[in-house]
Every structure is written in structure tokens, then in C-alpha cells.
Amino acid sequence: MPVTPGSLTRCEAGDQPFPPGQAKACTVREVLDRVGGKWSIGILVAASQGPVRFTELERRIEGISRRMLTLTLRNLERDGLLHRRVYPTVPPKVEYTATPIALELYESLVALTSWAERHHTAVADARGAYDQAHGTAD
């Protein structure tokens, strides 16, 4: 089937158009980018263990700014991975919980973070050796 300008779609704003058969790959890439993001894994692991509040996430996730936490929570909610519940109190109480699809992902995220904890030293050593051998550095 020939590709015509009307048959092309875009993955995200700013992306180049692609033929319809590539749409599935784009969707998979977007999902993996979201759940594999720098902050998403920690947020999803925390929310999978039960309701969690913003300030609790801020304390648990080392190095995250308030703005980045807000943006990541919003994106995870938008993608159907988190449910946000606002309680009508003063000040408002907000809790985040993992949705069923995020809970399905939980085991994989725990395995990935456990692997990273076990091998972070080996990766750092390999980087150092590579940089020394190739005369490069971060």
C-alpha cells in the first residue's frame, strides 16, 4: 500500500510522520520511555505498595525536584499508571495509588531496580576502564 501524506501519522508533536504500520512500535517506545524514565520507576514502586502522598514520594526519591515530581506524577496519571485521589480537607490531602496495569508491571520494576543495585559498581568500573582505554570521560 503506497504511503500518502494523508496516511502518515505522528507519534508525538514534533516527530516526523511515519507509515501506519509503524504506529505500534511508536506506542511501545512511548510506554517504555515513560515507565523506564529516571523518576518513574521509583514512583511506581512506591505507589504499588499502597497509597502514597506527594511529600512521602519527595522524601523517598533522592534528588527529585518538586517540579519534576509533579510533572512525572501528572504523566503517569495521564498514562493510566497512577490514580490520584484528592480528599476534601484543608489543606487538601492527595494520595497516589498504582492502577492495575501498574501493579502488573511492579515485579518487573523490582527486578530491574534489584539488578541495578547489584551491578552498579560493575557498571561504574566498566565505564572507568573504557574511559581510560579510550581517553574519554563523562
Image (cartoon, grey):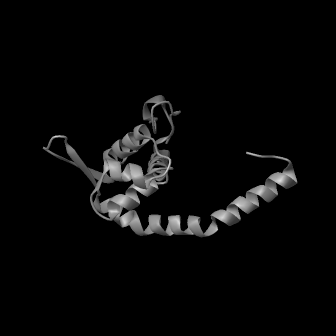
Q: Nearest the camera: 107 or 45?
A: 45
Image spot of residue 126 (x, y percent)? 75, 61
Question: Would you identify the image quadrant in which residue 101 lies?
Answer: bottom left
Q: Is residue 48 left or right of residue 64?
A: left
Figure check: 68 above or below 28: above
Q: Nearest the camera: 4 or 101?
A: 101
Image spot of residue 93 (x, y percent)? 21, 46
Figure check: 14 above or below 91: above
Q: Is residue 120 left or right of residue 5?
A: right
Figure check: 49 above or below 67: below
Which residue is painted at 52% across and 69% down in the image?
A: 114
Q: Is residue 89 left or right of residue 45?
A: left
Give the number of marks.
Answer: 0
Q: Nearest the camera: 43 or 37?
A: 43
Which residue is painted at 77% across and 46% down in the image?
A: 137
Q: Say which quadrant the C terminus sits in.
A: top right
Q: Is residue 17 left or right of residue 90?
A: right
Residue 125 is at least partly visible in this image: yes
Residue 84 is at least partly visible in this image: no
Which residue is painted at 81% across and 46% down in the image?
A: 136
Q: Nearest the camera: 79 or 49?
A: 49
Image spot of residue 37 (x, y percent)? 49, 50
Image spot of residue 22 (x, y percent)? 50, 46
